[in-house]
Structures are given as structure tokens and as C-alpha cells.
Image: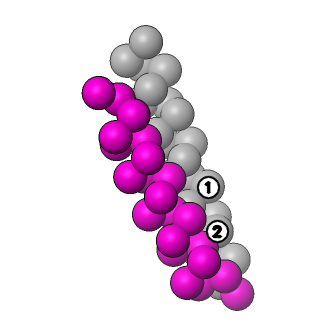
């Protein structure tokens, strides 16, 4: 049940990085998205 949101969050982040590769801000945003998901996962455990 927890795998779907994780995949969607990281998938969207990777897609954003691929589309806006030159923009470092997008990479930073994606990094924080992943960190946010990890924190959410840890809270559910």
C-alpha cells in the first residue's frame, strides 16, 4: 500500500529532473520530495 505513493513521488521527481535537467533548482526540489517521502515512510513504520 505504501509503495504506490513512493513510486509516484520519485517517478514525478525523476521526470521533472529529466525535463529540466539544466535547472539545478528542479534537482533540489526533487531531492526534498524524496526526503519528504522517506520521512513519511519512517513515520508509518
Q: Position of residue 34 (x, y in %)?
A: 54, 47
Answer few, some or many: residues within 10 Å of disc 2's Cα (few below 14, many 20 plus, some between 14 and 19). some
The residue positioned 49% from the left and 20% from the top of the image is: 42
Identify residue for label 1: 31
User: Magenta part mainly helix, strand or loop?
Assistant: helix
* Picture mark count: 2
For marks 2 and 1, give the CA distance: 6 Å
Query: What range of the chain is rendered magenta?
Result: 1-22
Residue 21 in the image, given as x and y percentages of width and height = 66, 82
**In this view, which residue lies farthest toward the top?**
45
Q: How far across and how far down the image is residue 39, in percent? A: 49, 30
Q: Quadrant of the N terminus?
A: top left
Q: Say if the magenta span includes residue 30.
A: no
Between residues 23 and 7, which one lies in front from this camera angle? 7
Residue 4 forms part of the magenta stretch: yes
Disc 1 crowd rating (10 Å Cα; few below 14, some 14-19, many 20+) is some
Looking at the picture, how far across and down is residue 25, in whole percent?
62, 75
Classify mark 2: helix, strand or loop.
helix
Residue name at image x 44 percent, y 63 percent: 12
Q: Return the mark for residue 27.
A: 2
Determine which of the numbered discs, if any, sits on residue 7 in the image: none
Amino acid at each position: 500500500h505504501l509503495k504506490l505513493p513512493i513510486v509516484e513521488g520519485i517517478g514525478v521527481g525523476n521526470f521533472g529532473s529529466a525535463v529540466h535537467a539544466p535547472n539545478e533548482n528542479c534537482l533540489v526540489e526533487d531531492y526534498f520530495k524524496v526526503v519528504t517521502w522517506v520521512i513519511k515512510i519512517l513515520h508509518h513504520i
